[in-house]
């Protein structure tokens, strides 16, 4: 048949009720195996496509998933969210689900509340975890299935993340093994779980190699470019072995400051980053960094939320598919 047929067409053609056809398609309900096989064979031969809206009403599903982006994301972070979203869409589209993107600020979650309270979605994926996570707390209270990308100290939250701890520890350990023990660390907000994970990984690398960290060289909660300028100049004067930035935005700032201050990388200051994005791809001096498969991260998160929506038990996952890429910036 050239045109798509409806559930009513199937029922009429086979002389059965619409309920029988629906039960055969869903695999639920009491019908004989012979009838189920007959229905499934007919719809396979005749181009039947289920009406997703009708399915949603019958099963009380919207076939929408909310993906929550932080409202204060930077342009450097955008490629990470985009790659995650691509991975999510590859999975959800295969199950007839659409994605609704919601922007949520740290203290303002009204966008998320609106889609939940109006029952516009069946589940939620949070793309960032916070120490004081209002969005996660609200979702726990609402009872809506959700998965968080990132780590959490709350064991009741289902999470998936790249193994940032092991990756950051490995990169730091490699630099220490090369004799670079006087390392500085520059990071962003400690309200973000990822900042604390990366900081602890840095510290553990020193502990595991029986080396002492110079804590005067650790600078967290850094976002002011003028303050960063002072820090970089100070580190160059101290002739530290290297600087590790927790993200590419900070690494970009450091490279820009070095150019302005005539500080040469790696001759005067070695540089590495705990993440990698398009910002570093075109750097004049290629930067040592960590590569993660963000697309796969999004795909895994999507599979987990779909399983939760179906009432399955889902365990936390830590993805090991990262690589340490050593480049000219740390030679």
Image (tube, helix red, strand yellow):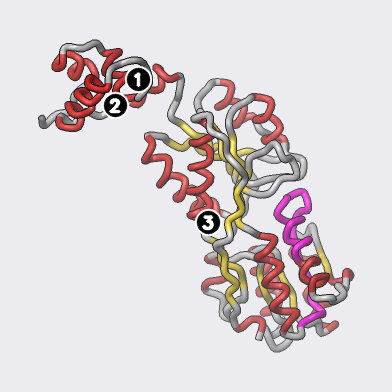
Q: What element carries label 2?
A: loop
Task: Work out how far the residue at label 1 is from the one at label 3, CA to CA, in angstroms.
Answer: 34 Å
Look at the image and give the residue range highlighted in magenta: 180-201
Q: Name the residue under label 3.
A: 294
Q: In this view, does 163 lie above or below 106?
A: below
Numbered disc 1: secondary structure: helix
Does residue 128 lie above or below 145 as drawn?
Answer: below
Tell me the crowding category of disc 2: few under 14, some 14 to 19, or many 20 or more residues within 10 angstroms, Cα based. Answer: some
Distance from disc 2 to disc 3, alpha carbons, whole Å, reads: 32 Å
Task: Give the residue at mark 2.
Answer: 50
Q: Where does residue 304 sit, x and y in percent of width and height?
A: 53, 41
Q: In which quarter of the image is the C terminus?
A: bottom right
**Residue sticking out furthest to the left:** 1
- Residue at (55%, 62%) from the top-left corner? 321
Q: Residue furthest front?
A: 33
Is residue 30 one of those drawn in magenta?
A: no
Left or right side of 226 for 140 = left
Q: Which residue is drawn at 50% across and 36% down?
A: 307
Image vertical order of residue 29 relative to residue 69, above or below: above
* In the image: residue 106, left or right of residue 89: right
Q: Is residue 185 above or below residue 99?
A: below
Residue shown at 81%/81% (left/top)? Answer: 240
Q: Residue at x 78, y 61 (%)?
A: 200
Residue under label 1? 54
Name the image quarter holding residue 168. bottom right
- Of marks 2 and 3, which one's residue comes earlier in the chain? 2
How crowded pointer 1 is (Cα within 10 Å; few <14, some 14-19, many 20+) is rated as few
């Amino acid at each position: 048949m050239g045109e798509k047929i409806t559930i009513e067409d199937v029922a009429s053609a086979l002389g059965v009720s619409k309920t029988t056809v629906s039960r055969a398609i869903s695999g639920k309900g009491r019908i004989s195996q012979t009838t189920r096989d007959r229905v499934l064979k007919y719809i396979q031969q005749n181009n039947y496509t289920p009406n997703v809206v009708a399915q949603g009403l019958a099963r009380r599903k919207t076939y929408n998933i909310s993906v929550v982006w932080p409202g204060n994301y930077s342009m450097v972070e955008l490629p990470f969210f985009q790659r995650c979203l691509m991975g999510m869409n590859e999975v959800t589209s295969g199950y007839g689900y659409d994605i609704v993107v919601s922007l949520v600020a740290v203290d303002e979650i009204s966008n998320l509340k609106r889609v939940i309270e109006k029952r516009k979605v069946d589940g939620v994926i949070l793309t960032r975890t916070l120490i004081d996570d209002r969005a996660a707390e609200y979702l726990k209270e609402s009872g809506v299935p959700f998965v968080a990308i990132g780590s959490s100290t709350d064991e009741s939250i289902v999470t998936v993340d790249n193994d940032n701890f092991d990756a950051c520890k490995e990169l730091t350990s490699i630099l220490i093994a090369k004799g670079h023990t006087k390392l500085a660390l520059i990071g962003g907000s400690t309200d973000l779980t990822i900042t604390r994970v990366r900081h602890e990984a840095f510290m553990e690398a020193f502990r595991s190699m029986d080396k002492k960290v110079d804590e005067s060289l650790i600078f967290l909660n850094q976002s002011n470019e003028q303050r960063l300028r002072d820090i970089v100049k100070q580190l160059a004067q101290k002739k530290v072995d290297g600087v590790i930035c927790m993200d590419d935005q900070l690494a970009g700032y450091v490279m820009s400051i070095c150019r302005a201050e005539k500080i040469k990388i790696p001759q005067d200051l070695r540089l590495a980053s705990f993440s990698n994005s398009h910002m570093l791809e075109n750097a004049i001096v290629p930067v040592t960094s960590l590569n993660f498969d963000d697309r796969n991260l999004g795909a895994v998160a999507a599979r987990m939320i779909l399983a939760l929506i179906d009432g399955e038990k889902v365990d936390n996952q830590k993805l090991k598919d990262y690589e340490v890429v050593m480049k000219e910036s740390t030679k």
